[in-house]
Image (cartoon, rainbow, N blue to C red):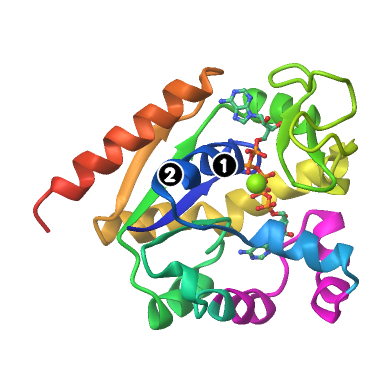
Amino acid sequence: MNIIFLGAPGVGKGTYTGKLKILYGIPHISTGDIFRENIKNKTELGRDAEAHIEKGELVPDELTIGMVKNRLAEEDIQNGYILDGFPRTIPQAEALEKFAKIDVVVNFVAAESVIMQRLSGRRICRKCGEIYHIKNIPTQVEGYCDLCHSETYQRDDDKPEAIKERLKVYEKQTKPLIDYYKKKGLIVGIDANSEDIETIVATIRSKLDEFKQKPA
Ligand code: AP5
Ligand code: MG
């Protein structure tokens, strides 16, 4: 299936996709990760995106849409994919329809206090991108990734000012996508408040199975 993961910053999209991409054997396409990779490699796209991301703003649609269109032209998407963090605006969703057929949109919901706690304690591995949390999912050795033993870091946009801006941007520009996809009959809702990640992942799987069996 071609799946979109929708939801506020910090709701856990990257964490759940990390598990599901292995279970389903399909690629995880995170626009945030692609931008961060470009920033790290000092590409032109990275330079254009960096100032927006640091402030918690969205990267302009024309840059983001072109980037996703190129990514979805690659060979590895034949058996499906999970799009994490795209689309995030109505124009992005309209553009996506022209070059992809989406089967289902999973919408994650959690309380704002839960989201704030998750974002402010998040740590990422500098090398492999594995996601941790200082309290919820701590590394075995503080400051170092369990998988590849590289250093972990706090994202620049996980500082309080940028978090505030990202949540505002989400409310204004991304939340309208829930209705957009509801009207198309594509939304599956998931309560992501629980700290039991395995249970959330199992719920996503069973809801996706149910959705697949629904008559069109
Ligand atoms: P992006 O990287 O996509 O950030 P985001 O949408 O703000 O989402 P996050 O990655 O912050 O949260 P997440 O839901 O993946 O949560 P995670 O799994 O890490 O985008 C970054 C920026 O790039 C944007 O602000 C924008 O500037 C730009 N951009 C990207 N896409 C764009 C687009 N389409 N258009 C324009 N600009 C775009 O989990 C969070 C924390 O919680 C972690 O520490 C994790 O360990 C913990 N956690 C997760 N789930 C649980 C749980 N159930 N219980 C306990 N802890 C949990
Ligand atoms: Mg993410």
* Amino acid identity at mark 1: Gly
* Amino acid identity at mark 2: Asn
Q: What stretch is highlighted in magenta?
A: 43-68
The reply, left or right, for residue 71 in relation to residue 41 is left
Whole-Å distance between the Cαs marked 1 and 2?
16 Å
* 156 is higher (above) or lower (below) than 153: below
Position of the C terminus, as image quadrant, is bottom left
The reply, left or right, for residue 74 in relation to residue 101 is right
Figure quadrant, ligand 1: top right
Q: Measuring from the top left, give residue 133's x and y in whole percent.
A: 75, 26
Q: Is the magenta stretch mostly helix, strand or loop?
A: helix
Q: Is mark 1 within 8 Å of ligand 1?
A: yes
Q: Toward which corner of the image does residue 1 lie, by quadrant?
A: bottom left
Query: Does residue 52 belong to the magenta stretch?
Result: yes
Residue receiving disc 2: 107
Residue receiving disc 1: 18
